[in-house]
Image (cartoon, rainbow, N blue to C red):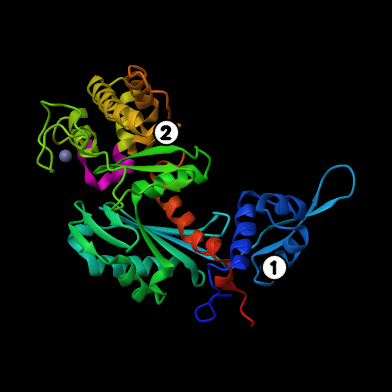
Protein backbone atom coordinates (compact mmCIF):
# COMPACT_ATOMS: atom_id res chain seq x y z
CA UNK A 1 0.00 0.00 0.00
CA UNK A 2 1.21 3.48 -0.74
CA UNK A 3 0.50 7.15 -0.74
CA UNK A 4 -0.48 8.28 -4.22
CA UNK A 5 2.22 10.64 -5.38
CA UNK A 6 1.38 11.35 -8.99
CA UNK A 7 -2.30 10.50 -9.67
CA UNK A 8 -3.74 13.11 -7.30
CA UNK A 9 -7.47 13.60 -6.99
CA UNK A 10 -8.68 17.18 -6.90
CA UNK A 11 -9.31 17.81 -3.18
CA UNK A 12 -11.94 20.43 -4.05
CA UNK A 13 -14.14 18.12 -6.19
CA UNK A 14 -17.62 17.26 -4.85
CA UNK A 15 -16.82 13.54 -5.05
CA UNK A 16 -13.70 13.97 -2.93
CA UNK A 17 -15.72 16.05 -0.45
CA UNK A 18 -18.29 13.23 -0.20
CA UNK A 19 -15.61 10.56 0.22
CA UNK A 20 -14.09 12.72 2.96
CA UNK A 21 -17.47 13.19 4.67
CA UNK A 22 -18.09 9.42 4.76
CA UNK A 23 -14.62 8.66 6.10
CA UNK A 24 -14.88 11.36 8.79
CA UNK A 25 -18.31 10.09 9.89
CA UNK A 26 -16.79 6.63 10.42
CA UNK A 27 -14.07 8.07 12.67
CA UNK A 28 -16.41 7.78 15.66
CA UNK A 29 -17.24 4.09 14.99
CA UNK A 30 -19.16 1.73 12.64
CA UNK A 31 -22.30 3.03 10.86
CA UNK A 32 -24.94 1.65 8.47
CA UNK A 33 -25.53 3.04 4.95
CA UNK A 34 -28.74 4.72 6.14
CA UNK A 35 -26.91 6.40 9.03
CA UNK A 36 -24.12 7.53 6.70
CA UNK A 37 -26.63 8.97 4.21
CA UNK A 38 -28.32 10.95 6.99
CA UNK A 39 -25.09 12.20 8.57
CA UNK A 40 -23.38 13.16 5.33
CA UNK A 41 -26.41 14.58 3.49
CA UNK A 42 -25.84 12.17 0.58
CA UNK A 43 -28.43 9.84 -1.06
CA UNK A 44 -28.34 6.18 0.00
CA UNK A 45 -27.46 4.94 -3.47
CA UNK A 46 -24.64 7.48 -3.70
CA UNK A 47 -23.37 6.23 -0.32
CA UNK A 48 -23.06 2.72 -1.77
CA UNK A 49 -20.94 4.01 -4.66
CA UNK A 50 -18.73 6.05 -2.34
CA UNK A 51 -18.29 3.08 0.03
CA UNK A 52 -17.34 0.86 -2.91
CA UNK A 53 -14.58 3.29 -3.86
CA UNK A 54 -13.37 3.58 -0.25
CA UNK A 55 -13.39 -0.22 0.10
CA UNK A 56 -11.40 -0.57 -3.12
CA UNK A 57 -8.82 1.82 -1.68
CA UNK A 58 -8.70 -0.29 1.49
CA UNK A 59 -10.12 2.45 3.70
CA UNK A 60 -13.40 0.84 4.86
CA UNK A 61 -14.60 -2.70 5.48
CA UNK A 62 -17.74 -4.59 6.55
CA UNK A 63 -18.37 -4.64 10.30
CA UNK A 64 -21.29 -6.99 10.92
CA UNK A 65 -24.92 -5.96 11.29
CA UNK A 66 -26.74 -3.38 13.40
CA UNK A 67 -28.67 -5.21 16.15
CA UNK A 68 -32.38 -4.39 16.42
CA UNK A 69 -35.86 -5.30 15.20
CA UNK A 70 -36.84 -5.38 11.55
CA UNK A 71 -34.47 -5.83 8.65
CA UNK A 72 -30.84 -5.99 9.77
CA UNK A 73 -28.62 -3.20 8.42
CA UNK A 74 -25.07 -3.98 7.51
CA UNK A 75 -22.40 -1.86 9.15
CA UNK A 76 -19.16 -0.50 7.74
CA UNK A 77 -16.11 0.70 9.66
CA UNK A 78 -12.73 2.32 9.05
CA UNK A 79 -10.10 -0.04 7.72
CA UNK A 80 -7.01 1.74 6.51
CA UNK A 81 -4.64 -1.12 7.25
CA UNK A 82 -1.34 0.25 6.01
CA UNK A 83 -2.50 3.86 6.34
CA UNK A 84 -0.05 5.23 8.88
CA UNK A 85 -0.15 8.62 10.59
CA UNK A 86 3.26 9.75 11.82
CA UNK A 87 3.45 12.14 14.78
CA UNK A 88 6.79 13.65 15.78
CA UNK A 89 7.60 15.97 18.62
CA UNK A 90 10.53 18.17 19.45
CA UNK A 91 10.88 19.26 23.09
CA UNK A 92 13.86 20.98 24.69
CA UNK A 93 15.19 17.68 26.06
CA UNK A 94 13.38 15.02 24.08
CA UNK A 95 12.55 13.81 20.57
CA UNK A 96 9.59 11.46 20.10
CA UNK A 97 7.97 9.56 17.24
CA UNK A 98 4.60 7.82 17.27
CA UNK A 99 2.72 5.91 14.55
CA UNK A 100 -1.04 5.41 14.70
CA UNK A 101 -3.67 3.98 12.39
CA UNK A 102 -6.56 6.10 11.08
CA UNK A 103 -8.65 5.44 14.20
CA UNK A 104 -5.82 6.81 16.35
CA UNK A 105 -4.69 3.44 17.77
CA UNK A 106 -1.03 3.44 18.73
CA UNK A 107 1.05 1.13 16.50
CA UNK A 108 4.60 2.07 17.47
CA UNK A 109 6.47 4.67 19.48
CA UNK A 110 9.99 5.64 20.40
CA UNK A 111 11.58 8.56 22.23
CA UNK A 112 15.11 9.75 22.92
CA UNK A 113 16.52 12.13 25.51
CA UNK A 114 18.69 14.76 23.82
CA UNK A 115 19.77 18.35 24.40
CA UNK A 116 18.06 19.81 21.33
CA UNK A 117 19.55 23.33 21.64
CA UNK A 118 23.08 21.88 21.84
CA UNK A 119 22.43 19.53 18.90
CA UNK A 120 21.28 22.31 16.57
CA UNK A 121 18.58 22.29 13.93
CA UNK A 122 20.11 20.09 11.22
CA UNK A 123 21.43 17.35 13.49
CA UNK A 124 18.22 17.38 15.52
CA UNK A 125 16.16 16.81 12.37
CA UNK A 126 18.57 14.05 11.27
CA UNK A 127 17.94 12.36 14.61
CA UNK A 128 14.17 12.89 14.34
CA UNK A 129 14.15 11.35 10.83
CA UNK A 130 16.12 8.40 12.23
CA UNK A 131 13.43 7.90 14.91
CA UNK A 132 10.69 8.17 12.28
CA UNK A 133 12.27 5.46 10.13
CA UNK A 134 12.61 3.31 13.22
CA UNK A 135 8.87 3.37 14.05
CA UNK A 136 7.30 3.52 10.56
CA UNK A 137 6.14 0.17 9.12
CA UNK A 138 5.62 1.82 5.68
CA UNK A 139 5.13 5.22 4.04
CA UNK A 140 2.88 7.53 6.11
CA UNK A 141 -0.29 9.19 4.77
CA UNK A 142 0.65 12.35 6.63
CA UNK A 143 3.13 13.69 9.16
CA UNK A 144 2.65 16.31 11.86
CA UNK A 145 5.42 17.75 14.01
CA UNK A 146 4.81 19.31 17.43
CA UNK A 147 7.23 22.10 18.40
CA UNK A 148 7.55 24.31 21.50
CA UNK A 149 7.35 27.74 19.87
CA UNK A 150 5.54 30.19 17.65
CA UNK A 151 4.56 28.55 14.37
CA UNK A 152 3.34 30.02 11.13
CA UNK A 153 1.33 26.87 10.41
CA UNK A 154 0.22 28.00 6.92
CA UNK A 155 3.88 28.19 5.87
CA UNK A 156 4.87 25.27 8.16
CA UNK A 157 7.70 27.41 9.54
CA UNK A 158 8.74 27.60 13.19
CA UNK A 159 9.17 31.36 13.70
CA UNK A 160 10.69 31.35 17.16
CA UNK A 161 11.38 28.72 19.81
CA UNK A 162 13.25 30.29 22.78
CA UNK A 163 13.87 26.91 24.46
CA UNK A 164 15.54 25.53 21.32
CA UNK A 165 17.12 28.84 20.24
CA UNK A 166 15.71 28.37 16.72
CA UNK A 167 14.31 31.15 14.52
CA UNK A 168 12.57 30.87 11.14
CA UNK A 169 13.26 27.12 10.88
CA UNK A 170 11.69 25.65 7.74
CA UNK A 171 11.01 22.36 9.46
CA UNK A 172 8.51 20.91 6.96
CA UNK A 173 10.86 21.38 3.99
CA UNK A 174 13.88 20.03 5.88
CA UNK A 175 11.97 16.95 7.11
CA UNK A 176 10.37 16.31 3.69
CA UNK A 177 13.84 15.86 2.22
CA UNK A 178 14.87 13.53 5.06
CA UNK A 179 11.70 11.41 4.91
CA UNK A 180 11.49 11.42 1.11
CA UNK A 181 7.93 12.84 1.18
CA UNK A 182 6.28 15.79 -0.55
CA UNK A 183 6.49 18.90 1.65
CA UNK A 184 2.67 19.23 1.67
CA UNK A 185 2.48 15.89 3.53
CA UNK A 186 4.13 17.52 6.56
CA UNK A 187 2.34 19.82 9.01
CA UNK A 188 4.08 21.75 11.79
CA UNK A 189 2.22 23.14 14.77
CA UNK A 190 2.67 24.50 18.25
CA UNK A 191 2.50 21.91 21.05
CA UNK A 192 -0.32 23.72 22.88
CA UNK A 193 -2.44 23.92 19.71
CA UNK A 194 -1.94 20.19 19.19
CA UNK A 195 -2.74 19.45 22.84
CA UNK A 196 -5.96 21.44 22.45
CA UNK A 197 -6.82 19.54 19.25
CA UNK A 198 -6.22 16.16 20.91
CA UNK A 199 -8.38 17.04 23.92
CA UNK A 200 -11.17 18.28 21.66
CA UNK A 201 -11.14 15.22 19.36
CA UNK A 202 -10.91 12.81 22.30
CA UNK A 203 -13.95 14.24 24.04
CA UNK A 204 -13.05 17.12 26.40
CA UNK A 205 -15.28 19.55 24.47
CA UNK A 206 -15.56 21.44 21.21
CA UNK A 207 -15.14 24.91 22.83
CA UNK A 208 -12.03 24.60 24.93
CA UNK A 209 -8.93 26.41 26.09
CA UNK A 210 -5.89 24.22 26.72
CA UNK A 211 -3.19 25.62 29.01
CA UNK A 212 0.17 23.96 28.54
CA UNK A 213 2.84 23.87 31.24
CA UNK A 214 6.48 22.99 30.60
CA UNK A 215 9.76 24.87 30.32
CA UNK A 216 7.45 27.61 28.99
CA UNK A 217 3.72 28.25 29.34
CA UNK A 218 1.45 28.33 26.30
CA UNK A 219 -2.15 27.92 25.32
CA UNK A 220 -4.31 26.62 22.50
CA UNK A 221 -7.88 27.43 21.66
CA UNK A 222 -10.37 25.18 19.89
CA UNK A 223 -13.77 26.47 18.79
CA UNK A 224 -16.28 24.42 16.84
CA UNK A 225 -13.71 21.61 16.79
CA UNK A 226 -11.15 23.79 14.94
CA UNK A 227 -7.90 25.36 16.22
CA UNK A 228 -8.25 29.16 16.30
CA UNK A 229 -4.95 30.68 15.24
CA UNK A 230 -5.40 34.45 14.94
CA UNK A 231 -3.93 36.65 12.21
CA UNK A 232 -0.33 35.37 12.44
CA UNK A 233 -0.96 31.99 14.02
CA UNK A 234 0.05 33.03 17.53
CA UNK A 235 -3.39 33.05 19.24
CA UNK A 236 -3.54 31.52 22.72
CA UNK A 237 -0.03 32.55 23.78
CA UNK A 238 -0.93 33.39 27.38
CA UNK A 239 2.50 32.96 29.01
CA UNK A 240 3.05 36.71 29.15
CA UNK A 241 -0.21 37.73 30.81
CA UNK A 242 0.82 39.80 33.85
CA UNK A 243 -0.17 38.07 37.11
CA UNK A 244 2.08 39.82 39.64
CA UNK A 245 2.96 43.54 39.30
CA UNK A 246 5.87 43.21 41.78
CA UNK A 247 7.02 39.82 40.49
CA UNK A 248 10.15 38.53 38.79
CA UNK A 249 11.53 39.98 35.56
CA UNK A 250 10.53 37.88 32.54
CA UNK A 251 12.63 36.91 29.49
CA UNK A 252 10.29 39.16 27.47
CA UNK A 253 11.53 42.21 29.40
CA UNK A 254 8.39 42.82 31.45
CA UNK A 255 7.62 41.97 35.08
CA UNK A 256 5.47 39.28 36.67
CA UNK A 257 4.37 37.36 33.56
CA UNK A 258 2.53 34.05 34.15
CA UNK A 259 5.52 32.22 32.68
CA UNK A 260 7.88 33.52 35.41
CA UNK A 261 5.69 31.81 38.03
CA UNK A 262 4.43 28.77 36.15
CA UNK A 263 7.39 27.40 34.18
CA UNK A 264 8.46 24.07 35.65
CA UNK A 265 11.90 25.21 36.87
CA UNK A 266 10.36 28.19 38.73
CA UNK A 267 7.84 25.98 40.52
CA UNK A 268 10.52 23.48 41.47
CA UNK A 269 12.72 26.33 42.80
CA UNK A 270 9.79 27.43 44.94
CA UNK A 271 9.21 23.85 46.09
CA UNK A 272 12.74 22.87 47.17
CA UNK A 273 16.13 24.33 48.13
CA UNK A 274 19.01 24.49 45.60
CA UNK A 275 20.82 21.17 45.25
CA UNK A 276 17.66 19.18 46.00
CA UNK A 277 17.11 16.12 43.73
CA UNK A 278 13.93 17.86 42.54
CA UNK A 279 16.15 20.02 40.31
CA UNK A 280 18.01 17.09 38.70
CA UNK A 281 17.48 17.35 34.92
CA UNK A 282 18.48 13.67 34.57
CA UNK A 283 15.08 12.75 36.07
CA UNK A 284 13.28 14.34 33.11
CA UNK A 285 10.02 16.26 33.49
CA UNK A 286 8.07 13.14 34.46
CA UNK A 287 10.57 12.09 37.13
CA UNK A 288 10.77 15.52 38.75
CA UNK A 289 7.00 16.00 38.74
CA UNK A 290 6.53 12.50 40.23
CA UNK A 291 8.94 13.42 43.02
CA UNK A 292 7.07 16.69 43.63
CA UNK A 293 3.74 14.83 43.85
CA UNK A 294 5.23 12.40 46.30
CA UNK A 295 6.35 15.28 48.55
CA UNK A 296 2.92 16.92 48.43
CA UNK A 297 1.28 13.62 49.41
CA UNK A 298 3.67 13.33 52.33
CA UNK A 299 2.70 16.85 53.48
CA UNK A 300 5.98 18.65 52.63
CA UNK A 301 4.80 22.20 53.40
CA UNK A 302 7.17 23.95 51.00
CA UNK A 303 6.01 21.76 48.09
CA UNK A 304 2.34 22.17 49.04
CA UNK A 305 2.65 25.96 49.16
CA UNK A 306 4.56 26.15 45.86
CA UNK A 307 1.90 24.20 43.99
CA UNK A 308 -0.96 26.08 45.65
CA UNK A 309 0.63 29.39 44.58
CA UNK A 310 1.03 28.01 41.07
CA UNK A 311 -2.73 27.26 41.07
CA UNK A 312 -3.53 30.80 42.17
CA UNK A 313 -1.30 32.28 39.42
CA UNK A 314 -2.93 30.04 36.80
CA UNK A 315 -6.36 31.06 38.09
CA UNK A 316 -5.55 34.78 37.83
CA UNK A 317 -4.35 34.40 34.22
CA UNK A 318 -7.21 32.07 33.28
CA UNK A 319 -9.78 34.53 34.64
CA UNK A 320 -8.73 36.94 31.89
CA UNK A 321 -8.73 34.16 29.29
CA UNK A 322 -12.21 32.98 30.30
CA UNK A 323 -13.62 36.53 30.31
CA UNK A 324 -12.32 37.15 26.78
CA UNK A 325 -12.88 33.77 25.11
CA UNK A 326 -15.80 32.19 27.00
CA UNK A 327 -14.68 28.55 26.60
CA UNK A 328 -16.89 25.72 27.86
CA UNK A 329 -13.93 23.99 29.47
CA UNK A 330 -10.37 24.86 30.49
CA UNK A 331 -7.98 21.92 30.24
CA UNK A 332 -4.81 22.00 32.34
CA UNK A 333 -2.17 20.33 30.15
CA UNK A 334 1.55 19.52 30.15
CA UNK A 335 2.97 19.10 33.66
CA UNK A 336 -0.07 20.97 35.08
CA UNK A 337 -2.12 17.85 34.23
CA UNK A 338 0.03 15.74 36.55
CA UNK A 339 -0.65 18.20 39.39
CA UNK A 340 -4.38 18.41 38.64
CA UNK A 341 -5.39 17.12 42.11
CA UNK A 342 -3.88 20.25 43.67
CA UNK A 343 -4.29 22.83 40.89
CA UNK A 344 -7.93 22.50 39.84
CA UNK A 345 -9.34 23.81 43.14
CA UNK A 346 -7.32 27.07 43.42
CA UNK A 347 -8.00 27.74 39.71
CA UNK A 348 -11.75 27.23 40.28
CA UNK A 349 -11.69 29.56 43.28
CA UNK A 350 -10.05 32.33 41.21
CA UNK A 351 -12.49 31.82 38.32
CA UNK A 352 -15.51 31.78 40.63
CA UNK A 353 -14.53 35.21 42.00
CA UNK A 354 -15.09 36.71 38.53
CA UNK A 355 -18.61 37.53 37.35
CA UNK A 356 -18.21 35.54 34.10
CA UNK A 357 -15.96 32.73 35.29
CA UNK A 358 -18.24 29.84 34.40
CA UNK A 359 -15.89 27.49 32.54
CA UNK A 360 -15.31 23.97 33.84
CA UNK A 361 -11.69 23.25 34.83
CA UNK A 362 -10.24 19.78 34.27
CA UNK A 363 -6.76 18.26 34.13
CA UNK A 364 -5.82 16.84 30.72
CA UNK A 365 -6.61 13.12 30.55
CA UNK A 366 -3.83 12.74 28.00
CA UNK A 367 -1.24 14.40 30.24
CA UNK A 368 2.20 14.99 28.76
CA UNK A 369 1.25 12.93 25.69
CA UNK A 370 -1.48 15.30 24.48
CA UNK A 371 0.64 17.18 21.87
CA UNK A 372 1.80 13.90 20.28
CA UNK A 373 -1.80 12.62 20.21
CA UNK A 374 -2.86 15.87 18.56
CA UNK A 375 -0.05 15.55 16.02
CA UNK A 376 -1.21 12.01 15.17
CA UNK A 377 -4.77 13.30 14.58
CA UNK A 378 -3.45 16.14 12.43
CA UNK A 379 -1.26 13.74 10.41
CA UNK A 380 -4.27 11.46 9.74
CA UNK A 381 -6.33 14.52 8.86
CA UNK A 382 -4.49 14.80 5.54
CA UNK A 383 -6.11 11.54 4.45
CA UNK A 384 -9.51 12.35 6.00
CA UNK A 385 -9.52 15.57 3.97
CA UNK A 386 -8.67 13.74 0.75
CA UNK A 387 -9.21 9.93 0.90
CA UNK A 388 -8.16 9.65 -2.74
CA UNK A 389 -4.54 10.17 -1.64
CA UNK A 390 -4.42 6.56 -0.47
CA UNK A 391 -4.74 3.42 -2.55
CA UNK A 392 -3.86 -0.19 -2.11
CA UNK A 393 -0.77 -1.19 -4.05
CA UNK A 394 -1.50 -3.62 -6.88
CA UNK A 395 1.11 -6.09 -5.62
ZN1 LIG B 1 6.91 37.87 29.72
Q: Position of residue 269 (x, y in %)?
A: 18, 33
Task: Specify the quadrant that holds the C terminus.
Answer: bottom right
* Residue 282 appears in the figure: yes
The residue located at (60%, 65%) in the rendering is 14
Q: Could you give the CA–CA distance between mark 1 and mark 2, rounded to whole angstroms?
A: 39 Å
Instruction: Pick whichever of labels 1 and 2 is earlier in the sequence.
Output: 1
Check the picture and name the quadrant holding the N terminus: bottom right
Q: Which residue is mark 1?
A: 55
Quarter for ligand 1?
top left
Few, some or many C-alpha atoms within 10 Å of disc 1 (few <14, some 14-19, many ≥20)?
many
> What residue lies at 62% left-to-right and 75% top-to-bottom?
392
- Residue 279 covered by magenta stretch: yes
Q: Which mark is residue 255?
A: none
Drawn side of residue 241 relative to residue 15, left or right: left
- State left or right for residue 190 relative to residue 240: right
**Which segment is the magenta one?**
278-288
Left or right, 133 with respect to 267, comes to right
Residue 110, located in which quarter of the rendered image?
Answer: bottom left
Which SS class for mark 1?
helix
- On screen, residue 11 above or below 190: below
Determine the residue positioned at 68% across, 53% down.
Answer: 41
195 magenta-colored: no
Rendered location of residue 242, percent (x, y): 19, 31
The answer to whether mark 2 is within 8 Å of ligand 1 is: no
What secondary structure prevails in the magenta region? helix
The residue drawn where x is 43% and y is 68% is 185
| Residue 253 on image: x %, y % | 9, 41
* Res 384 → quadrant: bottom right
Q: Nearer the viewer, residue 94 or 35?
A: 35
Badge 2: residue crowd in 10 Å (few <14, some 14–19, many ≥20): many
Give the quadrant of residue 219: top left
Which residue is disc 2 drawn over? 327
Amino acid sequence: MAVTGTRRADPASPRTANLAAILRALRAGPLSRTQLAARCGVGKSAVSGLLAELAERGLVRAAGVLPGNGRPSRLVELDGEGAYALALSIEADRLSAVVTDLAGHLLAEHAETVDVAALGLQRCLDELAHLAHRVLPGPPVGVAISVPGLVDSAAAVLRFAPALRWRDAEIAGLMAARLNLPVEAIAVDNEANLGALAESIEGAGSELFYLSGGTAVGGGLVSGGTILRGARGFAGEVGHIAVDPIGERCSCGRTGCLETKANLAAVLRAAAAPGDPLHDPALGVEGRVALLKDRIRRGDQRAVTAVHELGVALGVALSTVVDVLDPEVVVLGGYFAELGDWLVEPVRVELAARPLGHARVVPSELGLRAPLRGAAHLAAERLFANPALFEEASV
